[in-house]
Image (tube, grey):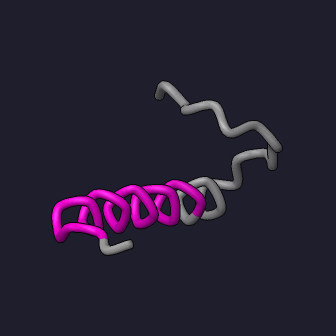
Amino acid sequence: MRLSGGVAVQVARRVLAMAAGIWHHDKIGAPVTRSLVACDH
């Protein structure tokens, strides 16, 4: 199965956004949670 370029870009954007969120929470000292629910702040 071959992914189109657009799908690969969308997956990469989501992975980078998740990594940025994890990094941000680590830097601000946010408490560690096990929830995958989006933060609204």
Camera-side residue: 39 or 29? 39
Query: Residue at horizontal 51%, vertical 54%?
Result: 21
Q: Residue furthest top?
A: 40
Q: Is residue 6 magenta?
A: yes
Q: Quadrant of the N terminus?
A: bottom left
Q: Residue furthest bottom?
A: 2
Q: Note whether 31 is above or below 4 in the view shown.
A: above
The image quadrant of residue 16 is bottom left
Give the left or right position of residue 7, taking residue 36 as reference: left
The image quadrant of residue 35 is top right
The image quadrant of residue 38 is top right
Residue 19: x and y, percent?
51, 65
Q: Is residue 5 magenta?
A: yes
Query: Residue at horizontal 81%, vertical 42%?
Result: 33
Magenta residues (range)? 3-22
Give the left or right position of residue 39, taking residue 5 as reference: right
Residue 10: x and y, percent?
28, 57
